[in-house]
Amino acid sequence: MRFLFFLNLSFFFIFLSVFADDRYEYTQIDRELSLAISSKDYQLNKDSYCRKSSKPEDVLWFEDFLDNSLDDKVWSYSSGNGFKSGNNYVYGWGNNEQQFYRTSKYKETNTNDNLWIENGFLKLQPMKKKYRGFDFTSARIHSKGKKVFTYPSKITFCFRVPNGIGLWPAFWLLPEKTNAWPAGGEIDIMEAKGRITNIISSALHYGNSPTDKSFTVKEIVVPASVKFQDKFHSITLEWRKDSLKFFLDNEENPYLSITPDSEDIFRFNYPFNDDFYLIINLAIGGNFDNNLLDPSALCIDKACSNHVDPDSKRFLIDWIEYSKLN
């Protein structure tokens, strides 16, 4: 069951603490942008609140990261600090991001010091490490040209986000066809700000051109006892023709839904009835959180020896499921 909380509930609006190292910040909830979700499930103290897997006969692809090697038949690495757009190179991936994404280093496992598989988790780790003129390194992988996702389907991620000002973990979808952004659409299934403990967001981008565009976004807020940085949660995208719906954990009601007739997008061509590929990345700095960045929050080596709890500084993916949607 889903509940909306307003300003009279101090639980969300006064005591929404944001922990970053030994400092606290307070974030006021935008009632139009954000939806607070409480669940009976959250009354139980568990490591994971992720939705249960689908029936085996409905599963099209499942990745639980039990093999320590990253599957090169599904995943490729993005490299660098930007991309080529026509004759121009766009630095910071168009968002003023500060990291250099590194490619595979260890051939036997197709991993590197910023991304590897351990104890059944895919781990993405940002590092304070100079490389090719940049102060930070991280990782970004994608399935372009290898694995395609489309409707009717259900895509579920079970994940935990890292703690640290300037950390920007995400998993998202871009069109397999090389349509100019944002005409082809962008589906941001999950984005998080490393300085905020119990808010994550989903967004959809669309438009005719980079100067004639818009987006739809929704933030979700959970109780402090089940913070996204402490517990595993899942987001499920239910994808039908002319319909996208997003669900947190075992919720039966979507926190975000969109159709061609939805407010704002009706002014543009609806781009989401197509083939898309998946991206998983952990950016550093950038416009998403007003370019805030605390370098001390990053690891200095693969072991993250400068932090007592290294996994708290890493983006952890437990499993991904792509299944039929009847």
Image (cartoon, rainbow, N blue to C red):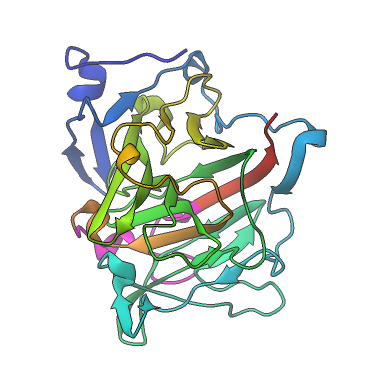
Q: Decide: is 119 above or below 321.
A: below
Q: Identify whether 221 is placed above or below 207.
A: above
The quarter of the displayed image where residue 92 is located: bottom left
Magenta stretch prevailing secondary structure: loop
Q: Nearer the viewer, residue 263 or 110?
A: 263
Position of the C terminus, as image quadrant, is: top right
Q: Residue at x 25, y 31 (%)?
A: 33
55 or 203, which lies in front?
A: 203
Of residue 181 and residue 231, the one placed in the foreground of this image is 181
Task: Give the residue at x 54% y 46%.
Answer: 273
Q: Position of residue 65 (x, y in %)?
A: 68, 54
Closer to the camera, 236 or 63?
236
Residue 297 shown in magenta = yes
- Give the total number of marks visible in the rendering: 0
Image quarter of residue 97 = bottom left
**Residue 161 covered by magenta stretch:** no
Q: Is residue 197 visible?
A: no
Q: Residue at x 48, y 52 (%)?
A: 171
Q: Bounds of the magenta span? A: 291-315
Left or right: residue 325 compared with residue 137: right
Residue 224 percent coordinates (x, y): 34, 27
Which x, y percent locates residue 297? 31, 59
Residue occupying the point 49% across, 32% down: 245
Left or right placement of residue 61 versus residue 303 in this view: right
**Camera sees residue 262:** yes
